[in-house]
Image (cartoon, helix red, strand yellow):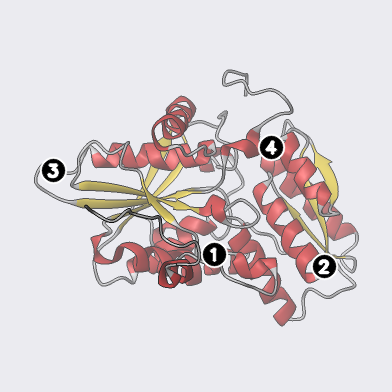
């Protein structure tokens, strides 16, 4: 007769497994910025030999990819003596960078003021306000360019009061991705990577990561995604032909292709990611994954590919209170 089987004692722990999956212990929330995970979007893949990976930038503590440049710009400005305790950091933002500035500023003890279009999502207004940030609203009809114009007016009127990092021209923006995002991706997928995709907002992500990809010893094709029309519903992305072009946007240095993306296509892929992958992401993430799906279909039969795209933030950042409607006028 076999002896009775008993469950393992509760004190029996796989300590190696526990250590491997332990969350880091840090001195400040800013130390949690970066080193975001990557997830394979296998349920969206149409061929097993063409991998599609998402870099989960929504896993940053501020909820978006913008945590990286916000921290880099603040640290570099403090080191250079440009940002001091008696100045207010002020910048224009459509939302995510503002949340990042607010979080980092609160953690490091710097005051923050933000200029944003009046029609940015309620969630972003509420989150930035929760950190004690001063909000200044520009015309909703002028979009991110109107916010840029307004912040420049404020700084010109009182230059001693403000430190203006100007995320659109600050080289610390792409530097954050050159030092962080790019090496992290290469460490994760190594020589398998064939394509890197990011959307164009300030352009810091695609420029900084793209430069690092071009230094890799294997060729990596860098693709930048922009809305296909000036009137679009891809919040956080810029249609360069109708916008103030960021000075840090120098595509000739590392971008192989600029891919126009329609609003409906990006929104539809965002929906598919929630349905098939359990990833509820923003529409800028939908645009990069839609671009990855397009590219995947062009890979010749018999060839392998590994496509990595940036997932900048979560979809819940775009909720309005108690209401979510896919179809609205933009």
Q: Secondary structure at mark 4?
A: helix
Q: Position of residue 219 (x, y in %)?
A: 25, 63
Q: Are marks 4 and 1 in contact (CB under 8 Å)?
A: no
Q: Please tell me which of labels 1 and 2 falls first in the chain.
A: 1
Q: CA distance from mark 2 to mark 3?
A: 52 Å
Question: Residue, x 47% and y 71% (percent of image)?
Answer: 19
Q: Disc 4 designates what residue?
A: 143
**Contact, mark 2 vs mark 4 (Cβ under 8 Å):** no
Q: Nearer the viewer, residue 189 or 244?
A: 189
* x and y percentages locating residue 33 in the rendered image: 59, 64
Q: Nearer the viewer, mark 4 or mark 1?
A: 1
Residue indicated by mark 3: 300
- The residue indicated by pointer 1 is 34
Q: Secondary structure at mark 1?
A: loop
**Which of the marked residues, 2 or 4, is nearer the chain's N terminus?**
2
Q: CA distance from mark 4 to mark 1?
A: 29 Å
Q: Which mark is residue 110?
A: 2
Work out how far the residue at label 3 is from the one at label 1, CA to CA, in angstroms: 34 Å
Separation of marks 3 and 4 at Cα, in angstroms: 41 Å
Residue density around tag 3, few if under 14, some if 14–19, many if 20 or more, within 10 Å: few
């Amino acid at each position: 007769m076999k002896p009775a089987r008993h469950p393992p004692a509760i004190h029996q722990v796989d300590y190696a497994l526990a250590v491997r999956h332990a969350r880091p212990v840090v001195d400040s929330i800013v130390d949690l910025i970066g080193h975001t995970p990557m997830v394979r979007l296998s349920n969206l893949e149409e061929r097993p030999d063409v991998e599609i990976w998402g870099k989960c930038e929504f896993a940053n503590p501020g909820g978006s990819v913008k945590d990286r440049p916000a921290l880099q710009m603040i640290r570099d400005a403090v080191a250079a003596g440009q940002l001091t305790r008696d100045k207010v950091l002020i910048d224009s933002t459509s939302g995510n960078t503002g949340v990042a500035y607010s979080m980092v500023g609160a953690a490091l003890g710097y005051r923050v003021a933000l200029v944003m279009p009046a029609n940015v999502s309620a969630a972003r207004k509420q989150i930035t306000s929760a950190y004690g940030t001063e909000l200044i609203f520009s015309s909703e009809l002028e979009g991110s360019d109107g916010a840029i114009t307004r912040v420049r007016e404020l700084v010109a009127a009182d230059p001693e009061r403000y430190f203006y990092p100007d995320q659109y021209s600050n080289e610390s923006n792409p530097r954050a991705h050159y030092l962080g995002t790019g090496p992290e991706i290469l460490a994760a997928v190594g020589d398998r990577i064939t394509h890197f995709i990011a959307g164009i907002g300030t352009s810091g992500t695609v420029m900084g990561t793209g430069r690092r990809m071009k230094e890799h010893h294997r060729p990596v094709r860098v693709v930048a995604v922009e809305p296909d029309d000036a009137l679009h519903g891809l919040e956080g992305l810029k249609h360069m032909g109708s916008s103030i072009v960021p000075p840090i946007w120098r595509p000739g240095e590392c971008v192989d292709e600029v891919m126009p993306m329609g609003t409906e296509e990006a929104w539809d892929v965002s929906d598919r990611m929630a349905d098939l992958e359990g990833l509820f992401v923003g529409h800028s993430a939908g645009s990069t994954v839609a671009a990855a799906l397009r590219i995947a279909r062009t890979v010749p039969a018999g060839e392998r590919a590994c496509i990595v795209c940036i997932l900048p933030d979560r979809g819940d950042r775009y909720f309005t209170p108690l209401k979510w409607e896919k179809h609205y006028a933009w």
